[in-house]
Image: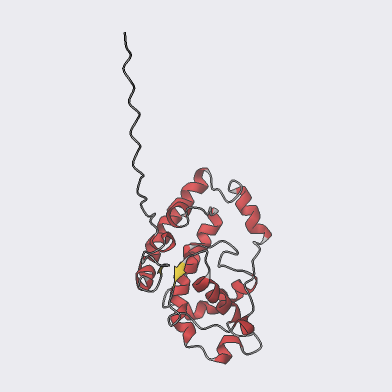
Amino acid sequence: MAPHVFPSVEYSTQETAQIDEWLSSTTSDKLETSLPTINDNLKDKTTLLGSKLSIADIVVYARVAELAKKWSSEERTGGESGGWRYLLRWIDYVQNTPALNLKISDEDKVPVDHSAVGTVVRGQEPKKEKDAAAAAGGNGKAKGKGKADADAAGESVLDKVTGAVEAVKEKIVVAGTGVLPEAVTGKKQKKEKAPKAPAPKKEGMEL
């Protein structure tokens, strides 16, 4: 998954499975019933995976944003549970973080009262997740069969996000370029190769 979406980030097999689960559990017919799970998961995390950004953050944001704009003050931060405050904090992070280099106009952003939802919390992966990552090969690298499983799961994830990415293309572009980021397209932008300098000519030897 990582080479196709976030080339600089490595995901364990378990993290890849989590990405797949977030994408499949937040489709239009499941989104509202999944909100409590998302909100609770983000209580002590910055991203859906904890601290790593993934395609799940972009796609779930795209699915939740319009719904979040319609929430009342009570739904946002009220009641004994505090409403959707953790979800809103995460929404604010995704739509503004320089790490994604996204450009969403102010009118399209979900309005968030920072004093009501707090600041971004850097999440810590539970110990069992760290152990699973270590078992997969250390530093989140999947080896052998684990790597094959991760690659297969990654392909299914990319298939699932296509529709959601298409829905936000006009709103999410790389700042100042009008080009979608690799995180959204899943494709690396081609870099132009610098022309090679001509090789110096060798002077002929005089006999």
Toward the viewer: 16 or 9? Answer: 9
Is residue 207 shown above or below 23?
above
Looking at the rendering, in which quadrant would you find the C terminus? Answer: top left
Q: Position of residue 84 (x, y in %)?
A: 57, 82
Q: Position of residue 69 (x, y in %)?
A: 47, 85
149 left or right, relative to 52:
left
Is residue 21 shown above or below 142?
below
Identified at 60% across, 68% down, the residue is 46
136 left or right, relative to 162:
right
Identified at 33% across, 42% down, the residue is 195
Residue 108 visible: yes
Number of numbered discs present? 0
Identified at 50% across, 47% down, the residue is 147
Q: How is this picture coloured? A: secondary structure
Q: Position of residue 71 (x, y in %)?
A: 51, 88
23 left or right, relative to 140:
left
**In the image, farthest residue toward the front:** 206
Residue 26 visible: no
**In the image, farthest residue toward the top:** 207
Is residue 46 shown above or below 194?
below
Toward the viewer: 159 or 189? Answer: 189
Is residue 52 shown above or below 26?
above
Toward the viewer: 148 or 141? Answer: 141
Q: Position of residue 88 (x, y in %)?
A: 56, 79
**In the image, farthest residue toward the right:** 127
